[in-house]
Amino acid sequence: MDGVSSEHLPGPEGDFLARYNPADHPPFAVTADLALLAVERGELYVLTRRRLSHPFEGRLGLPGGFLGPAESAETAAERIAREKTGLGTLVAVEQLRTYTDPERDPRMRVVSVAHVGIAATQNARLPKIIDDGQSSWTRCADLTPEMMAFDHHNILQDAIERIASRMEFTLVAARFLPETFTISQLRMVYAAVWGTDLDPGNFQRKLLATKVLEETGERYQAPGGRGAPAKVYRPALDGCDPLRPAFLIPPLRRV
Amino acid sequence: MDGVSSEHLPGPEGDFLARYNPADHPPFAVTADLALLAVERGELYVLTRRRLSHPFEGRLGLPGGFLGPAESAETAAERIAREKTGLGTLVAVEQLRTYTDPERDPRMRVVSVAHVGIAATQNARLPKIIDDGQSSWTRCADLTPEMMAFDHHNILQDAIERIASRMEFTLVAARFLPETFTISQLRMVYAAVWGTDLDPGNFQRKLLATKVLEETGERYQAPGGRGAPAKVYRPALDGCDPLRPAFLIPPLRRV
DNA sequence: TAAATAGTGTCTCTCAGACAATATCTT
DNA sequence: AAGATATTGTCTGAGAGACACTATTTA
């Protein structure tokens, strides 16, 4: 509901505006935070910012900021992604969850609407960062809770888990790659996010059976790569097509 | 991030508290809203409140309220569930997503952290409602967007979809039922939420294969029911055990 | 007895995973 | 030639779904 029925207001339910006084309620700040993920050479990275001030000075945080007056959380998260990477449409953003622990920020009550984003690799390199110098790509495997500010390590873990799950049922993994790519590249994205190895032969057959890819007719071989050049594909539709049959995480990993 | 790096603050990054002035930012209200679901006689219901005042007077809304000063959104949602039903631990609540469209409330900027909850049926009846008379259980199938206030119909659809997905991989469906139940009762919960029929024989075999249920030794037959009395089970662990193998929604429904 | 429900059995088809085999490339 | 990678093929076992069948109960 939206305040009208609140048990925090005195008396029976009445007109909201007439009764609502911001001073009656604790001041909430609402931010949009973003765990922006990318894959390079089979490893998963996240965009972090080194904090220069209290609290958590020196630790790594996720980029974020206040919601603008006419901005939804998703719009704000997309803006942040653009401001940091300049990637524009090559970043796919979706809302993750909202972190509301009253103690999560020692300064004041801050509600964080967290998002997860995927930045597309170009020429097998992490996207360039447009920034004041505080931001950088950090290998997710290297991050511990103690290295990060606030509850941002929790947010990061939730973000990775969300994307890992999405990859079971959609082609969202293709968002880590350029518009066209080989099946091996896609397999390495799966391996990086799921943290598991995948049989190349089975992966190829399984993925082509879902009909979500179409051949471009080209072939590609990584510079210095061995073996036969691989066929190049593009997503048949929008890059997030449903995978059927689904591509479930191997039970050993899923626990 | 939590405001320190905000592009909305003037000047270079400095100390947050020293710079942050609530008046500089548009006032945000943060509420926790709850789509509380229940199943009776194979049909899915949601707890709604008839609105008595502007805006959306006369329409149905989801229960909700402001976050208390030391309350997380989940805690607030659980409190709301208790206040409406008195069910206590028999309600399972989880965060759904946050709705931040600047226009979603015509009066002021309200960010809604929406939750989905499941209320356990007792004696095959919807739980009693403790309320001032505005609340009632409404059949989800009967609700249209025009009947509901704000974006609450969207929230409801997202809530149902979330629970439907959870039911593929966990025994969360058991939360709709008393502590012990028959496999038929559980199958009717699945049918109600997924909106599809399920073969009784296959359901039984599939579910028992996951080993998440244990027999109580009792048998039960609904009053006036036909057929053989059914074995009574209880969840082997906490009622949200992972289902392995998973129980995917039939493709026809999934589309 | 008829109808309904509980529970089991059977058959078929799909698919996942292990692994072999072949083709094509670089060094 | 040796090694690496792409791609296809083969085999096996798990499991889903259709459906038949038996058992048990009420009307």
Image (cartoon, coloured by chain):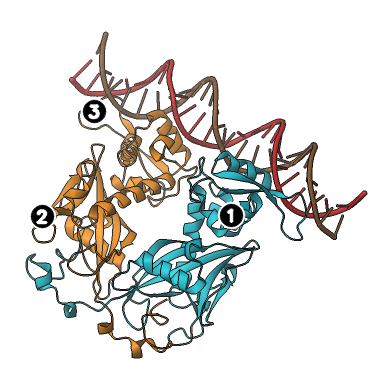
Chain colours: A cyan, B orange, C brown, D red
Nearer to me, B104 or B133:
B104
Quarter of the figure with residue A39: bottom right
Identify the residue under disc 1. Answer: A190
Within-10-Å neighbours for mark 2: few <14, some 14–19, many 20+:
few
Residue positioned 33% across, 70% down in the render:
A100
Tell me which chain the residue with mark 1 is part of: A
In the picture provided, is B214 more to the left or to the right than C16? Answer: left
Mark 1 against mark 3, which lies toward the viewer?
A: 1
Q: Where, quadrant-wise, is the N terminus of chain A in this rendering?
A: bottom left
Mark 2 against mark 3, which lies toward the viewer?
A: 2
For the residue labelled by badge 1, is the local secondary structure a helix, a strand or a loop? helix
Residue positioned 20% across, 56% down in the render:
B62
Nearer to me, B92 or A52:
A52
The image shows residue B117, relative to residue A111, as above or below, that is: above
Nearer to me, B81 or A106:
A106
Q: Which amino acid does label 3 sit on?
A: Gly
Q: Between marks 2 and 1, how big is the CA–CA gap?
A: 50 Å
Within-10-Å neighbours for mark 3: few <14, some 14–19, many 20+:
few
Residue B19 at what x, y percent from top left?
A: 34, 89
Identify the residue under disc 3. Answer: B225
Identify the residue under disc 2. Answer: B134
Instruction: Have a look at marks 2 and 3 and say if they share a chain.
Output: yes
Instruction: Have a look at marks 2 and 1 and say if they share a chain.
Output: no
